[in-house]
Amino acid sequence: MEFKYAIVGAGEVSNHIHIPALLKIPNTKIIAICDSDEEKAKSTAHYWNIPRYYTDTSELLNDASIDIVDICTPPSSHLAISAAALHTGKHVIIEKPMADNIDACKSICDKYNNYKNTNLKMGIIYNWLFGPTIIKLKGLIDTSLDNILNINIETNDNPYDPMISNANHWCHTFPGGRIGECLMHPIYLLQYFLGDIEIDNVWTAKRGAYQWVKYDELHVSFTAGSKHGNIYISFNGAGPGHTNVTINTRDTVLRFEGYPSTITSFSELSHNASFIKRGQSIIKTISQLSNSMISNTLRVLLKKSVSAHENYFREFMVCVATNNAAPITPEYAYKSHRIYFDLLKQLP
């Protein structure tokens, strides 16, 4: 079965993430690109050899050959574009966040409910959940979610991030600015592992020099029944942007390191554990790191590395072909968006 895609939005996320991921998938064609900036639409179509480009979304949606519309525009436009795409019989994929306010998120859910008795699918991209290493982490913990005590998620980036360093980027008009733009990722990751979460405490700081940035660090603590979670985001770090996740359970500690993309697990050791036991634990950790690094390197060298977005698109198309629910339905995404927008209201 062949899937014909149209992408709305010819910005960075389309050119650097979505289009490259889709082009790696067999039986997938990108047949149209749309952007209100004609030069962006035209240059993107030319660079990626996309047959058609549009500057008007309604003209794009009148193309009956399109199967799936992939929305990569700023969140304020997601409601109108997704509703119009459904109306013209297209499956819909929406980049996170689903919209720029919780009422618009609810409207997207309501509008999609009108089509649930059809075969049309709508999915929200929570790409962190589809990264190869996070999938492995999920597999290690899925059987013992009830044993989780707390989760800490740290996202560290540098001041040269292309969004925060660009005073004219749309993220600065969005609630929470650059931090608001990326905050959804750790929230939905906490939701996956902890279930329904509630905000406990919020702390922000500004340490960078950009005048157009209100704050560039955030720390939030959450509760989920007897479980706890923490999110820390900073755009004042050194080196490439990366995320680390630490999951503490009753009998082990799992650690995901985003930059080398490795996972290590530490089994419980008593305070009076012998020298041999401690040495065995260290050797096990070194072995895990080595195996992860070797595996990741081989995947890249053998060109078998698969991005999170590619995994998501593949799963979405399987759901379309089999008429199953899309990965990350609007209803599921609404829960984390509620927390997300409640948190944005508490930011200065």
Image (cartoon, helix red, strand yellow):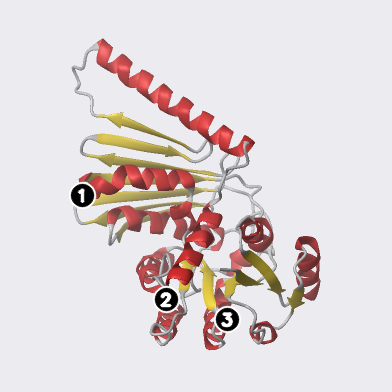
Give, as a three-letter code, the residue at label 1.
Asp
- N-terminal of the two: label 2 or label 1? 2
Q: Is residue 163 rendered to the left or right of residue 132?
A: right
**Quarter of the figure with residue 20:** bottom right
Q: Which mark is residue 146?
A: 1
CA gap, disc 3 and disc 2: 17 Å
Q: Position of residue 177 (x, y in %)?
A: 55, 62
Q: Position of residue 343 (x, y in %)?
A: 39, 64
Disc 3, SS: helix
Mark 2 lies on residue: 102
Disc 1, SS: helix
CA gap, disc 2 and disc 1: 29 Å
Up/down of 2 relative to 90, above or below: above
Check the image and name the residue furthest to the front. 1
Give me the residue at 76% from left, 65% from top.
44
Q: Nearer the viewer, residue 127 or 107?
A: 127
Q: Is residue 182 at all visible to an observer of this figure?
A: yes
Up/down of 87 relative to 201, above or below: below
Contact (CB < 8 A) between labels 3 and 2?
no
Mark 3 lies on residue: 81
